[in-house]
Amino acid sequence: MKMIKNYNHTVLILFILNTVILIQTCFSVSGDWRNILIGSLVSFIFYFMVVYIPTHLRKENAKRVFLHFYNQFREDVLREILHLAEFEGDKNEKVEELKNTDNFISFAQEPSEEEGQTNWHVLMNNIDSDDHGHARKTIVVRLSELQREADFLVRAVGVEDETLLQNFRRLDRSLQDGRYKEELDWNWGEDKQFTDSLYELLSGRSLVADDQGDFIKEWVKKL
Protein backbone atom coordinates (compact mmCIF):
# COMPACT_ATOMS: atom_id res chain seq x y z
CA MET A 1 0.00 0.00 0.00
CA LYS A 2 2.90 2.37 0.76
CA MET A 3 4.35 1.74 -2.70
CA ILE A 4 0.98 2.56 -4.28
CA LYS A 5 0.75 5.84 -2.35
CA ASN A 6 4.30 6.79 -3.34
CA TYR A 7 3.48 5.99 -6.97
CA ASN A 8 0.35 8.16 -6.84
CA HIS A 9 2.34 11.05 -5.36
CA THR A 10 4.99 10.73 -8.07
CA VAL A 11 2.41 10.80 -10.85
CA LEU A 12 0.70 13.85 -9.34
CA ILE A 13 4.00 15.69 -8.95
CA LEU A 14 4.97 14.94 -12.56
CA PHE A 15 1.56 16.13 -13.74
CA ILE A 16 1.91 19.43 -11.86
CA LEU A 17 5.49 19.97 -13.08
CA ASN A 18 4.58 19.29 -16.70
CA THR A 19 1.59 21.59 -16.44
CA VAL A 20 3.70 24.42 -14.96
CA ILE A 21 6.37 23.98 -17.64
CA LEU A 22 3.79 24.12 -20.42
CA ILE A 23 2.17 27.24 -18.94
CA GLN A 24 5.52 28.97 -18.57
CA THR A 25 6.45 28.04 -22.13
CA CYS A 26 3.14 29.45 -23.42
CA PHE A 27 4.01 32.86 -21.98
CA SER A 28 7.51 32.81 -23.46
CA VAL A 29 6.43 32.33 -27.07
CA SER A 30 3.97 34.04 -29.34
CA GLY A 31 1.79 33.47 -32.38
CA ASP A 32 1.15 29.98 -33.70
CA TRP A 33 3.52 28.35 -31.26
CA ARG A 34 1.51 29.70 -28.33
CA ASN A 35 -1.69 28.31 -29.82
CA ILE A 36 -0.04 24.92 -30.32
CA LEU A 37 1.26 24.84 -26.76
CA ILE A 38 -2.08 25.90 -25.32
CA GLY A 39 -3.74 23.12 -27.31
CA SER A 40 -1.17 20.66 -26.02
CA LEU A 41 -1.72 21.82 -22.45
CA VAL A 42 -5.48 21.41 -22.74
CA SER A 43 -5.06 17.95 -24.28
CA PHE A 44 -2.61 16.92 -21.57
CA ILE A 45 -4.94 18.01 -18.76
CA PHE A 46 -7.93 16.43 -20.52
CA TYR A 47 -6.12 13.09 -20.89
CA PHE A 48 -4.99 13.09 -17.27
CA MET A 49 -8.43 13.93 -15.88
CA VAL A 50 -10.61 11.90 -18.25
CA VAL A 51 -8.44 8.89 -19.13
CA TYR A 52 -5.59 8.34 -16.68
CA ILE A 53 -7.32 9.01 -13.36
CA PRO A 54 -10.47 6.90 -14.07
CA THR A 55 -8.33 4.02 -15.40
CA HIS A 56 -6.04 4.13 -12.39
CA LEU A 57 -8.95 4.27 -9.95
CA ARG A 58 -10.66 1.35 -11.73
CA LYS A 59 -7.53 -0.78 -11.42
CA GLU A 60 -7.00 0.08 -7.76
CA ASN A 61 -10.64 -0.66 -6.98
CA ALA A 62 -10.42 -4.06 -8.72
CA LYS A 63 -7.33 -4.92 -6.68
CA ARG A 64 -8.97 -3.76 -3.46
CA VAL A 65 -12.07 -5.88 -4.13
CA PHE A 66 -9.97 -8.94 -4.95
CA LEU A 67 -7.82 -8.62 -1.82
CA HIS A 68 -10.98 -8.35 0.28
CA PHE A 69 -12.27 -11.54 -1.35
CA TYR A 70 -8.90 -13.25 -0.94
CA ASN A 71 -8.78 -12.45 2.77
CA GLN A 72 -12.25 -13.96 3.20
CA PHE A 73 -11.22 -16.94 1.08
CA ARG A 74 -8.30 -17.73 3.37
CA GLU A 75 -10.48 -17.37 6.45
CA ASP A 76 -13.12 -19.74 5.08
CA VAL A 77 -10.64 -22.37 3.92
CA LEU A 78 -8.56 -22.21 7.11
CA ARG A 79 -11.70 -22.69 9.18
CA GLU A 80 -12.44 -25.90 7.27
CA ILE A 81 -8.80 -26.94 7.62
CA LEU A 82 -9.15 -26.70 11.40
CA HIS A 83 -12.29 -28.81 11.23
CA LEU A 84 -10.56 -31.49 9.17
CA ALA A 85 -7.54 -31.43 11.51
CA GLU A 86 -9.92 -31.92 14.47
CA PHE A 87 -8.69 -28.74 16.14
CA GLU A 88 -10.28 -28.04 19.50
CA GLY A 89 -10.17 -24.45 20.61
CA ASP A 90 -11.13 -20.96 19.52
CA LYS A 91 -11.31 -21.38 15.73
CA ASN A 92 -11.72 -17.66 15.02
CA GLU A 93 -8.57 -16.80 16.93
CA LYS A 94 -6.68 -19.68 15.34
CA VAL A 95 -7.76 -18.66 11.84
CA GLU A 96 -6.32 -15.18 12.37
CA GLU A 97 -3.07 -16.76 13.51
CA LEU A 98 -2.87 -19.14 10.55
CA LYS A 99 -3.29 -16.37 7.99
CA ASN A 100 0.43 -15.94 8.48
CA THR A 101 2.03 -18.55 6.24
CA ASP A 102 4.83 -19.38 8.69
CA ASN A 103 2.28 -19.97 11.45
CA PHE A 104 0.32 -22.23 9.13
CA ILE A 105 3.40 -24.33 8.37
CA SER A 106 4.14 -24.67 12.10
CA PHE A 107 0.56 -25.74 12.81
CA ALA A 108 0.52 -28.28 9.99
CA GLN A 109 3.74 -29.86 11.24
CA GLU A 110 2.77 -29.92 14.92
CA PRO A 111 2.15 -33.36 16.48
CA SER A 112 -1.56 -34.10 16.86
CA GLU A 113 -3.27 -36.08 19.59
CA GLU A 114 -3.02 -39.08 17.28
CA GLU A 115 0.27 -40.78 18.11
CA GLY A 116 2.89 -40.40 15.40
CA GLN A 117 0.80 -38.02 13.31
CA THR A 118 0.92 -34.30 12.61
CA ASN A 119 -2.12 -32.07 12.28
CA TRP A 120 -1.76 -32.32 8.52
CA HIS A 121 -1.74 -36.12 8.65
CA VAL A 122 -5.05 -35.99 10.50
CA LEU A 123 -6.46 -33.71 7.82
CA MET A 124 -5.27 -36.06 5.08
CA ASN A 125 -6.96 -38.97 6.83
CA ASN A 126 -10.23 -37.07 7.12
CA ILE A 127 -10.37 -35.41 3.70
CA ASP A 128 -12.01 -38.40 2.01
CA SER A 129 -14.31 -39.27 4.90
CA ASP A 130 -18.05 -38.95 4.35
CA ASP A 131 -18.27 -37.45 7.83
CA HIS A 132 -16.23 -34.48 6.59
CA GLY A 133 -17.83 -34.14 3.17
CA HIS A 134 -19.18 -30.66 3.89
CA ALA A 135 -15.74 -29.31 4.77
CA ARG A 136 -14.25 -30.86 1.65
CA LYS A 137 -17.00 -29.45 -0.57
CA THR A 138 -16.62 -25.98 0.95
CA ILE A 139 -12.90 -25.94 0.19
CA VAL A 140 -13.46 -27.11 -3.39
CA VAL A 141 -16.11 -24.44 -3.98
CA ARG A 142 -13.94 -21.69 -2.54
CA LEU A 143 -10.98 -22.74 -4.68
CA SER A 144 -13.20 -22.55 -7.74
CA GLU A 145 -14.28 -19.06 -6.71
CA LEU A 146 -10.63 -18.05 -6.29
CA GLN A 147 -9.92 -19.15 -9.84
CA ARG A 148 -12.78 -17.04 -11.21
CA GLU A 149 -11.89 -13.98 -9.14
CA ALA A 150 -8.21 -14.15 -10.11
CA ASP A 151 -9.17 -14.47 -13.78
CA PHE A 152 -11.49 -11.45 -13.53
CA LEU A 153 -8.78 -9.40 -11.79
CA VAL A 154 -6.20 -10.08 -14.49
CA ARG A 155 -8.68 -9.18 -17.23
CA ALA A 156 -9.83 -6.02 -15.44
CA VAL A 157 -6.42 -4.69 -14.47
CA GLY A 158 -4.17 -6.02 -17.19
CA VAL A 159 -0.67 -7.36 -16.51
CA GLU A 160 2.26 -5.65 -18.20
CA ASP A 161 5.02 -7.65 -16.54
CA GLU A 162 5.54 -10.88 -18.49
CA THR A 163 6.79 -12.92 -15.52
CA LEU A 164 3.85 -11.82 -13.39
CA LEU A 165 1.44 -12.65 -16.19
CA GLN A 166 2.87 -16.14 -16.54
CA ASN A 167 2.53 -16.66 -12.78
CA PHE A 168 -1.16 -15.79 -12.91
CA ARG A 169 -1.67 -18.02 -15.94
CA ARG A 170 -0.06 -21.00 -14.26
CA LEU A 171 -2.07 -20.34 -11.12
CA ASP A 172 -5.23 -20.28 -13.23
CA ARG A 173 -4.37 -23.63 -14.79
CA SER A 174 -3.61 -25.09 -11.36
CA LEU A 175 -6.94 -23.96 -9.95
CA GLN A 176 -8.79 -25.38 -12.95
CA ASP A 177 -7.03 -28.72 -12.64
CA GLY A 178 -9.06 -31.81 -11.83
CA ARG A 179 -7.56 -31.94 -8.34
CA TYR A 180 -9.93 -29.10 -7.38
CA LYS A 181 -13.11 -30.79 -8.59
CA GLU A 182 -15.64 -32.17 -6.17
CA GLU A 183 -15.87 -35.34 -8.28
CA LEU A 184 -12.36 -36.44 -7.36
CA ASP A 185 -11.95 -40.18 -6.94
CA TRP A 186 -11.04 -39.85 -3.28
CA ASN A 187 -10.42 -43.59 -2.95
CA TRP A 188 -7.66 -43.69 -5.57
CA GLY A 189 -5.06 -41.31 -4.23
CA GLU A 190 -6.27 -38.07 -5.77
CA ASP A 191 -6.89 -36.81 -2.25
CA LYS A 192 -3.09 -36.79 -1.71
CA GLN A 193 -2.60 -34.67 -4.82
CA PHE A 194 -5.36 -32.35 -3.65
CA THR A 195 -4.00 -31.93 -0.11
CA ASP A 196 -0.44 -31.40 -1.37
CA SER A 197 -1.61 -28.58 -3.61
CA LEU A 198 -3.77 -27.12 -0.85
CA TYR A 199 -0.79 -27.16 1.50
CA GLU A 200 1.34 -25.29 -1.00
CA LEU A 201 -1.33 -22.67 -1.51
CA LEU A 202 -1.91 -21.99 2.20
CA SER A 203 1.72 -22.29 3.25
CA GLY A 204 2.88 -19.80 0.63
CA ARG A 205 5.22 -22.31 -0.98
CA SER A 206 4.18 -21.35 -4.50
CA LEU A 207 2.54 -23.82 -6.85
CA VAL A 208 3.74 -21.92 -9.87
CA ALA A 209 6.78 -19.80 -9.00
CA ASP A 210 9.74 -19.55 -6.64
CA ASP A 211 7.98 -17.08 -4.34
CA GLN A 212 7.51 -17.80 -0.67
CA GLY A 213 5.02 -16.22 1.70
CA ASP A 214 1.54 -15.10 0.71
CA PHE A 215 2.53 -14.99 -2.95
CA ILE A 216 -0.94 -14.26 -4.36
CA LYS A 217 -1.24 -11.11 -2.25
CA GLU A 218 2.26 -10.04 -3.32
CA TRP A 219 1.43 -10.59 -6.99
CA VAL A 220 -1.70 -8.44 -6.71
CA LYS A 221 0.29 -5.60 -5.15
CA LYS A 222 2.63 -5.66 -8.15
CA LEU A 223 -0.19 -5.22 -10.69
Image (cartoon, rainbow, N blue to C red):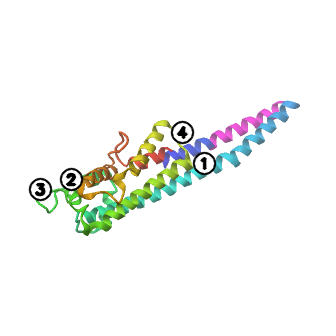
How far apart are the two marked residues, 1 and 4, measured between alpha carbons? 14 Å
Is any atom of residue 30 visible in this view?
no
Residue 21 within the segment the image draws in magenta: yes
Give the residue at x 20% y 58%: 119
The answer to whether mark 3 and mark 2 are in CB contact below 8 A is no
Residue 47 quadrant: top right
The answer to whether mark 1 and mark 4 are in CB contact below 8 A is no
Give the residue at x 11% y 56%: 116
Instruction: Point out residue 34 in the picture as x, y percentages from the top left corner.
Output: 84, 33
Instruction: Point out residue 222 in the picture as x, y percentages from the top left corner.
Output: 48, 43
Instruction: Kindly identify the amino acid type of the residue bearing the numbered disc 1.
Output: His
Q: Which mark is residue 109?
A: 2
- Callout 4 environment at 10 Å: few (<14), some (14 to 19), or many (20+)? few
Q: Which mark is residue 160?
A: 4
Residue holding disc 1: 56
- First in residue order: circle 3 vs circle 2: 2
